Amino acid sequence: MNTVRSADPWRDTDVIDARAPRTNQAIVGTLSLLAFVTGWWPILALLGAQLAIGLRFGRRYCLPCLLYFGVIQPRFGEGPIEDSRPPRFANMVGVAFLGAATAAHLLGATAIGWGLGLIVAALALLAATTGLCVGCEMYKLGARLRGIRPGQILHVDLAELGAERHEGETVVQFTHPLCTDCHTLETELRASGRRLVTVDVSRRPEIARKYGIALVPTAVAVGPEGFVTSRIA
């Protein structure tokens, strides 16, 4: 079955099908729980090693990625496209916990090892079943702590963005062509009749850096002089 993809899973690595991380989380969570039930802790080491290999060498070396993009996605179609950085960070957290669990077992601290393994199982299964990814939320919180937080954009140079000056309000949306939420927001804004200027961060990364855009979609309403009056997304 041929799959029509808006994002190539091997080339467009700055975004990812949202169902892929959840497939990975389901596998990690299930196998971590299996390790505890069977008492065979090397499963935790193998899971940590697989996550680390995928992070270091890319999706083609990630077994759950190969399963999802090669078997599951062609049969069920592409899911929503999202920023790949939060789930990637979540995988880093998983590697840290699984690595610590493995080290604890090797040192004979089995209680600590199983405790860490069960934390991985619980968080991974929570993300897989509900979509609540704690590691992803940690990434977003970290972005805010680094200074990339709501309300930071105070003024936008509309002329720099190629926008004509108008009386009244203009919405400036920072977007990405492969971002599903970006397309949804843009459609809603245009349907509401608001004057909209979009900035593709993949084509204008220098603008994204200037305004501290860590995640898309980000949208602000500005007045005729470019001063931000409200934050929309």
Image (cartoon, rainbow, N blue to C red):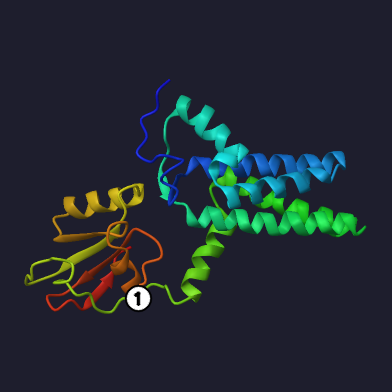
The one of 78 and 49 positioned closer to us in this rendering: 49
Check the image and name the residue furthest to the top: 1
54 sits to left or right of 230:
right
65 sits to left or right of 95:
left
Check the image and name the residue furthest to the front: 57
Task: Identify which residue is drawn at 19% across, 75% down.
Answer: 157
Task: Identify which residue is drawn at 46% across, 41% down.
Answer: 10
User: Label 1 amino acid?
Assistant: Gly
The percent position of residue 135, horizontal first and vertical second, equals 58, 58
The percent position of residue 30, horizontal first and vertical second, equals 70, 40
Task: Identify which residue is drawn at 35% across, 76% down.
Answer: 151
Indicate the quadrant where residue 213 lies. bottom left
Which SS class for mark 1? Answer: loop
Asked if residue 23 shows in the view, the reply is no
Task: Identify which residue is drawn at 17% across, 50% down.
Answer: 191
Question: In the rendered image, which quarter contains the N terminus?
Answer: top left
- Count the labels in the image: 1
Asked if residue 104 shows in the view, the reply is yes
Indicate the quadrant where residue 192 lies. bottom left
The residue at which mark 1 appears reads as 151
Determine whether 41 is above or below 197 in the image: above
Question: In the rendered image, which quarter contains the C terminus?
Answer: bottom left
91 sits to left or right of 72:
right
231 sits to left or right of 118:
left
Determine whether 16 is above or below 63 in the image: below
The percent position of residue 58, horizontal first and vertical second, equals 55, 47
The percent position of residue 222, horizontal first and vertical second, equals 20, 72
